[in-house]
Structures are given as structure tokens and as C-alpha cells.
Amino acid sequence: MRFCYATERYIPTGWVGLEPVDRPNRWANVPHVVPCPMEPYTVDLEVRFRDLDPMQHVNNAIYVTYLEQARARFYEEVVGTTLADIDTVLAQVEVSFERPIEGVGTVRVELTVGELGRSSIPMTYELFSGDERVATGRSVQVYFERDSGTSRPIPEDLRERLS
């Protein structure tokens, strides 16, 4: 895990003004030194004709599918597993629409993993059509025990791959 020194201030969505620090073990317990946010994972997804409504805009429900497709690719390419093989369940998802995606083509999704909880994996998303941001999203997955259906702590090896 990389660490950053917060050069400015903390706001509810995170630290403003982060500078990477060298020798992270030396800085791990110093105030204002926090884990660096990961670089966003970026994926281009196809906008299919079936995604469109009669006005040739992507249907609002499809945006959640785009988040899921980005999350699935992230797990495969970065974490090294699939959504089917990892013991998580989607606990929350939300989308804020800014402008419509019009017609077929591609949509770019930028996914960032937030600060992990004991069992929760928060993710934020930005969706772009061309260079224009069209929506933002947020999801929370919970790591759980399949047999009992109860949450359990995220294993350390998975935490490292998600950071």
C-alpha cells in the first residue's frame, strides 16, 4: 500500500491535496499520512442498440449494468478473480445522472475503490460519453459467508489486491 501526506485538508469525500511519501513504513502512523487513493480503473464499454430508449438515449436502468460490467472487469483484470468466484453481495448501488448518453458507441467508466471497511467494499464510478461526464455512481459490496449469509471480514490478501 502506498501512503500520501495530506497537504491541505480533509473533506467528507476524502483528503484534498495528497502527496506520495517515500519510505511508507516510517510514515504509517503519522497524523495526516493516509493511504493514497488508487488510480481509477478505466474501461470502455459498448453502448448497444438494445440499451437505447425510443428517444435514442441510453435507458436509465442500463447505467447500473454499466457499473456492474466495469466492476466485473475490474475484478478479473486487477483482483484476479470473477464476481461469481468472490464472496461478495451487492448491498447498495446509486446513480446520479448528469446528461443523457445518446446513440450507440462507447461509454468510458472510471472505477475507484474507496476506503475498505471490515467487510464492505465501496466503489465510486464516473461515466463518460466522449469527453463529457454523463453520470456518477456509487456501490457497496459486502464480503460474506455463503453458508450462513452473514458478513465476514475481508481477507488480508484481498484487501491488498483492492488497494
Image: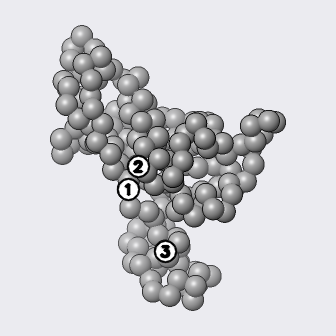
Mark 1 near mark 2, Cβ–Cβ under 8 Å?
A: yes
Return the mark for residue 111. 2
Q: Crowding near pointer 3: few (<14 within 10 Å), some, many (20+)?
A: some
Q: Secondary structure at mark 2?
A: strand
Residue 131, x across and y down, in percent: 18, 45
Question: Looking at the picture, does residue 67 appear above or below residue 6?
Answer: above
Which kind of residue does numbered mark 1 sit on? Pro
Residue indicated by mark 1: 40
- 73 or 115: nearer the eye? 73
CA distance for labels 2 and 3: 18 Å
Q: Is residue 49 left or right of residue 20?
A: left
Question: Looking at the picture, does residue 15 appear above or below residue 7?
Answer: above
CA distance for labels 3 and 1: 15 Å
Residue 75, x across and y down, in percent: 49, 47
User: At 32% across and 45% down in the image, what residue appears?
Assistant: 43
User: At 74% across and 37% down in the image, what residue appears?
Assistant: 146
Q: Is residue 36 visible?
A: yes
Which kind of residue does numbered mark 2 sit on? Leu
Which badge, 1 or 2, comes first in the chain's sequence? 1
Q: Is residue 158 left or right of residue 68?
A: right
Question: Looking at the picture, does residue 2 appear above or below residue 89?
Answer: below
